[in-house]
Image: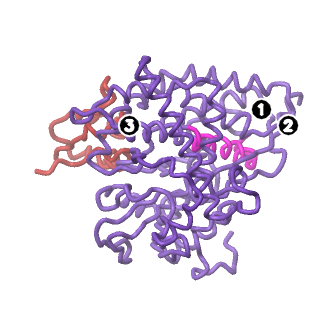
Chain colours: A purple, B red
Amino acid sequence: MSAPTLKLSDINLNDPELFEREGAHDVLRLLRREAPVHWNPGGEVANGFWSITKYDDIRFVSRNPELFISSKGIAGPGIRPEALQSLDSGAQPQNAGANISIIGMDPPRHVKMRRLVNKGFTPRAVNAMEPEIRRITNEILDKIDGRDELDFVLEVASQLPLAVICGMMGLEQKDWALMFDLTNKVLGSGDPEYQTEVPEEERGTSAAARATAMLGVGTMMEYFRNVLEDRRRNPREDDLPTILLESEIDGEKLSEGDLLAFCFLLILAGNETTRNGISGGLRVLCEHPDQKAKLLKDMSLMESAVEEILRWVSPLHHMARTATADTEIRGQQIKAGDRVLMWYPSANRDEEVFEDPYTFDITRTPNEHLAFGIGEHFCLGAGFARRELKVMFEELFRRFPNIELAGKPERLRSNFINGTKHLPVRLNSGR
Amino acid sequence: MKVQVNADMCEGHAKCEKAAPEVFKVGDDDVSVVLVDEVAPELVEKVERAIRMCPRQAISWAKV
């Protein structure tokens, strides 16, 4: 429901707190109706940016990766150059020399780099992995069997995607918790809960966010430097770091920076978003008991339910692009160099595309949501994400059909990741 | 009309095969191939749908 007081002039989608308190849908709905291509002014630290909120416009931006490039930054509005220096004081330049990964790469190099690994992510690869995904899922559920209340994010939702991607990367199980922690530091850097290395009185500031992200990035780079060093000496079959080490583009091996950035992206992207899809999915099903009951009665609806969960949750709030030439969308003049943010939750509630977009309907067809983006940068891991959600909910509801929410979800303070940090649930096994 | 699949972009999601099985088939290498030389008029709509749905936007009408 739109709050009656909401005015266009008050809108600021660079306010992570808006997303933490789940107020963004009201804002996005207003933008779709009154200013679908909207200039969001910058602030002391952040640049201004265009908010793209209509489904068709997000498709247009995505389908033109040379006009709207990724290499100037894919998250947030970007930091004003003059603000950068003050923010960096105190942070260690540990990630100096780090290259960008495919998510921030443009054509034609992007597709060449992506093709080094994409065979590992096709529907065929996902099918081959399904028994392993099911085995891991049941191992996770074995650990909570017999319990009553627990934090679904920490004990369940985070554990499956973490195990799958760490397994594909060949990382030792003792390091998985570190990967979880570092992912939170990098992608949840703006949330005080993860700013553990910053003095308490400074938490919640932009400087604290940047310092936390830098620390996370630096530690992860160091970790993967060691992994790559190990695989150079002891190559393994089928592990992603080894595949990358042995790969060539146009006859050249990847640089250390490219390798690190690639490993880094795979770990981050492989565990954070799917975690939020799983926790967000359980939450929306529990909040719509009729839909949960319908699914439990007919588990063949699972694939369609997963699509509706993805539409509803939209694990990523946005991706950013930068215009390379002056252009126009819906009559708005976008200048070369302007930052453009595509708001996926808005595309996925677009009244012109989805019938009753605010109704959660696990049988919705068609359901061509943009939760994974589209085109050049379509989520490489989409197949795994979908399968992990499907298998998790199949096994979870088979074993704990009476699971319910047992408290208020704690949300991530971020306008990039639609994250849930904690989700208290009750298993009600005995019922 | 001729339709083409960009093999560099295709990652075998098979949405095209679902939308227009008469025209597209995903091979063992996870890349979709076009089965017909010319798309028959009655299949144009299905192909349009495949073009729209392709997650990688790898399908296009061939320019003559």
Q: Position of residue A60 (x, y in %)?
A: 36, 60
Query: Tag 3: residue type?
Result: Glu
Q: Which residue is mark 2?
A: A149
* Residue beneath the point at 36% across and 74% down: A334
Q: Is residue A123 left or right of residue A318?
A: left
Name of the residue lying farthest toward the right: A430
Name of the residue lying farthest toward the left: B64
- The residue mark sitting in front, 1 or 3, is 3
Q: Secondary structure at mark 2?
A: strand
Q: Which residue is mark 1?
A: A401
Q: What is the chain letter for disc 3? A: A
* Residue beneath the point at 52% across and 75% down: A42
Q: Is residue A227 left or right of residue A389?
A: left
Q: Which residue is mark 3?
A: A256
State the CA–CA distance, disc 1 to disc 2. 14 Å
Q: Using a 10 Å C-alpha cutoff, classify the residue at mark 1 as few (fewer than 14 neighbours), some (14 to 19) or many (20 or more).
A: some
